[in-house]
Amino acid sequence: MLAFVAVCCGQQANEYVQISGYAQGSNYSVKLNMKGVNVPVEVIRDSIDALIVQIDTTLSGYNKKSLISRFNAGEKIPSNPMFLDIYREGYRLWERSGGALDFGAAALYDAWGFGFRNSSFPTDEEITHLLENSGMGHLPAELPVQDGYIDPAVMGYPRLNFNAIAQGYSCDVIASYLYSIGAKDMLVDIGEIWCDGLNPNGEPWSVGIDRPVDQTADGRSMPEGLDGIWTSNGKPAGIVTSGNYRKFYIRNGRKYSHTINPRTGYPVEHNLLSATVVSANNAAESDAIATWCMVIGLQGAQVLILGDPALEGYLIYTDENDEMVEWASPGFTLRK
């Protein structure tokens, strides 16, 4: 793994650094204000890299030697605080969402080709079988640990998939470390984002919101680019966008979204193209709730966002004329 350190430009450039590297299949970037931080930047860089390696070897389903891959293969694994922590968070979110988020439905996601394995197109019978034999409803609220190990055999060999939360959780892990060394102004970008305080120009952080790229009913391509720029208020916030416009496949002329409703077993079919969620709590929550919105569709997502004072959201959908329309919650600050 290679990580790089650069000085950020701006009015306070001498106080800001940027640490970049490679993680979870893409580049990551951490920008922070070194004012009040007494740890050398090289130590911060090495500590961030060590945390990213720990996350990868614990939670990545694409790393065949990670703890989750070994667990999903039916292997007994050593008890691990990070593994237990994200499992507890996943179980809590499963309960909160009424099953719209299901981190125990890895076999179902794999069957549709949007998990960790190659798949064939599942039959209705296969989906029924998967619904009856997988999911968090078959698992305990706490993973049983015996003699320092977690044994999937005790629980009937479940398979887990934390894709809907892992990148947001990774942001929170890095941010927690930065807070621990005294950092106050930061932006952690690992595909999903956590930010707090001000940027090098002394202004609240800004994040671009992608304009969904999809096809309308008549086959016209929608324009690509930024739909707008979200600006924080200088307070802690996780911001994550989830959408169906990048990952899908066509079979017999029909489009199948990568968002699977774990309660029905089938890809969702609605007009919501993307959901951007801002959470004042943590990036893991932003990550999970953005996926939750994509499962339940436009009206459900609006109710969900408006019903939680810790959340703000921005939804992009198509209307009855296949025109792209945006909806923002009252506190979502977007400039075009």
Image (cartoon, grey):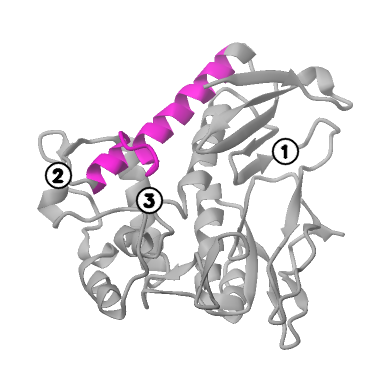
User: Is residue 65 visible in this depiction of the protein?
Assistant: yes
In the depicted view, which residue is nearer to us: 212 or 200?
A: 212
Mark 3 nearby-residue class (10 Å; few <14, some 14–19, many ≥20) = some
Residue 83: percent from left, percent from top: 32, 41
Q: Earlier in the sequence, mark 1 or mark 2?
A: 2
Nearer the observer, disc 1 or disc 2?
Answer: 2
User: Is residue 282 visible in this depiction of the protein?
Assistant: no
The residue that disc 3 covers is 116
Which secondary structure, mark 1? loop
Q: Earlier in the sequence, mark 3 or mark 1?
A: 3
In the depicted view, which residue is nearer to us: 68 or 313?
A: 68
Dominant secondary-structure state across the stretch colored magenta:
helix
In the image, farthest residue toward the bottom: 320
Can you tell which mark lies on residue 87?
none
Q: Are marks 1 and 2 in contact (CB under 8 Å)?
A: no
The residue that disc 2 covers is 151
Mark 2 nearby-residue class (10 Å; few <14, some 14–19, many ≥20) = many
45 in the magenta segment? yes
Marks 3 and 1, how far apart in space?
37 Å
